[in-house]
Image (tube, rainbow, N blue to C red):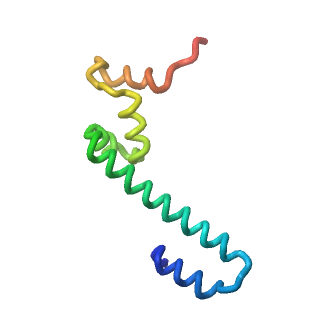
Amino acid sequence: MCSTPSLKTYCRQELKGCSFLGLIETFLEVSDGLISLDKLIIKIVTNHYSLKKALEQIPGVGLITSLGYVLAIRDPECFENSSDVGRLTWPRSAT
């Protein structure tokens, strides 16, 4: 698997003159932007949301899921027990 910089170089060399090289360039720029956003999100979450570390210890819970919980819950002290959190995030129907 190529790193993004070497993939860019490879694509530019191999596809020189192809009509869809502009599309490939745009795709690689978007990919770079997503990588930058991922790094920014990780930095913000790591520096400002300490509770997310505890949530990420749950199997299958990653950065975005734990950040969503932290932002939805805000203050965990508002809940008497953990089952109250489930009612906030997954309310039952009235039936």
What's the residue at 33%, 40% (across, down)? 55
82 vs 4: above or below:
above
Q: Position of residue 66 (x, y in %)?
A: 38, 40
Which image quadrant: the C terminus?
top right
Along the line of sight, which residue is nearer the eye, 82 or 67? 67
Along the line of sight, which residue is nearer the eye, 86 or 14? 14
What's the residue at 28%, 41% (across, down)? 48
Q: Is residue 13 left or right of residue 56?
A: right
Q: Quadrant of residue 10?
A: bottom right
Residue furthest to the top in view is: 94
Q: Is residue 65 left or right of residue 58?
A: right
22 vs 76: above or below:
below
Along the line of sight, which residue is nearer the eye, 17 or 81? 17
38 vs 27: above or below:
above
Q: Position of residue 30 (x, y in %)?
A: 55, 62
What's the residue at 33%, 45% (across, down)? 45
Q: Position of residue 93 (x, y in %)?
A: 57, 17
Give the total of numbered labels. Answer: 0
What's the residue at 32%, 51% (across, down)? 43
Q: Position of residue 64 (x, y in %)?
A: 43, 44
